[in-house]
Image (cartoon, rainbow, N blue to C red):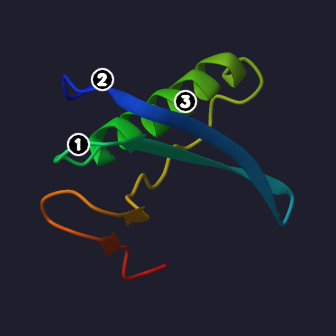
Amino acid sequence: MCHPITIQGTDLQFSYEEIDDDYMLLIEATVTVKSNTGVEMEALTAVSAAALTFYDMCKAVDKSMVIEETLLVKKTGGKNGDFRHPRL
């Protein structure tokens, strides 16, 4: 991962939304650590790798898939404190 620290736990959640006749895959990563640094980069890396893997596995069916936004939703603790994305 991005930092040489001991990660306490990870979780990936997948869900989808149907929009008109299309589907949108939602990928959420949760990473926990007991340390003075945040692990948002590890969570963002996990989501990005999962999206690229999904694209690679499904490109034979639909090469027009689009990987859109990757964003930090929420972060707690760490040197800079808590964060929640203002759009969500």
Q: Amino acid at mark 1?
A: Ser
Q: Amino acid at mark 3?
A: Ala
Rendered residue at 84%/66% (across/down): 20
Residue 20, above or below 14: below
**Viewer-nearest of discs 1 and 2:** 1
Residue 26 is left or right of residue 50, and the answer is right
Rendered residue at 16%/47% (across/down): 36
Residue 61 is left or right of residue 9, and the answer is right
User: How far across and down, in percent of the image, does residue 2 sit?
Assistant: 23, 28
Q: Secondary structure at mark 3?
A: helix
User: How far across and down, in percent of the image, does residue 76 sit?
Assistant: 34, 64
Q: Secondary structure at mark 2?
A: loop
User: How far across and down, in percent of the image, does residue 71 sit?
Assistant: 39, 57
- Measured Cα–Cα span from mark 3 to mark 2: 14 Å
Of callouts 1 and 3, the N-terminal one? 1
Toward the viewer: 87 or 8?
8
Rendered residue at 86%/58% (across/down): 21
Q: Amino acid at mark 2?
A: Met
Mark sitting on residue 35: 1
Residue 53, above or below 51: above
Q: Secondary structure at mark 1?
A: loop
- Measured Cα–Cα span from mark 1 to mark 3: 25 Å
Toward the viewer: 60 or 15?
15
According to the image, label 3 marks what residue? 50
Label 2 neighbour load within 10 Å: few <14, some 14-19, many 20+: few
Rendered residue at 49%/34% (across/down): 9
Of callouts 3 and 2, the N-terminal one? 2
Residue 25 is left or right of residue 19, and the answer is left
Mark sitting on residue 1: 2
Of callouts 1 and 2, the N-terminal one? 2
- Measured Cα–Cα span from mark 1 to mark 2: 15 Å
Residue 10, above or below 17: above
